Image (cartoon, rainbow, N blue to C red):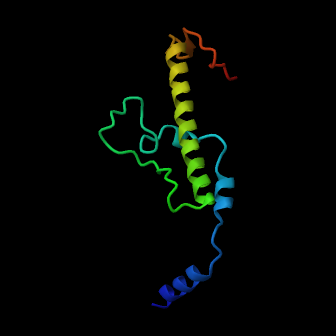
Amino acid sequence: RIHTAQELVLASYERRRYQRDAVNAMPLYPTERTLWDESQIPSVNYTGEGCLALPKLNLQFLTAHDYLLRNFNLFRLEATYEIREDIADVLSRVGGFTDEDGNVRFAGWARMGLPLT
């Protein structure tokens, strides 16, 4: 009972994180977890049967800060989708396979695919 009261007092007086700090802490490019998360960004085979959990960009009852934050989130989701599509395109073009020695080889070529050593 005392522990619960302490938690309530601490929760009400703790310093809240500013949204600006949260946005600044976000990575510039999508992480691998975000890139392949089907719940955030649907795959190419999305048929439209279910609804997407994307925030709407209505101007009604929004402050300028809310509008910019929602627009930023939509921009990040769109950029993540485009990056994922580019990666899928490159992977289909390079035609990776495993040779007899167990090494990964590539039979094709892609302008956006570069070897990493």
* Frontmost residue, 42 versus 36: 42
Quarter of the N terminus within the rendering = bottom left
* Frontmost residue, 113 versus 80: 80
Residue 88 x, y percent position in the rendering:
50, 24
Say which residue appears at 29% left-offset and 39% top-offset. 49
Residue 78 x, y percent position in the rendering:
54, 38
Q: Is residue 44 above or below residue 54?
A: above
Say which residue appears at 64% left-offset and 40% top-offset. 29
Residue 95 x, y percent position in the rendering:
51, 13
Quarter of the C terminus within the rendering = top right
Q: Can residue 96 be seen here?
A: no
Question: Farthest residue in the left direction?
Answer: 49
Say which residue appears at 64% left-offset and 58% top-offset. 22
Q: Is residue 27 above or below residue 12?
A: above
Q: Can residue 93 be seen here?
A: yes
Q: Is residue 2 above or below residue 92?
A: below
Residue 116 occupies quadrant = top right
Query: Is 60 left, or right, of 49 in this rendering?
Result: right
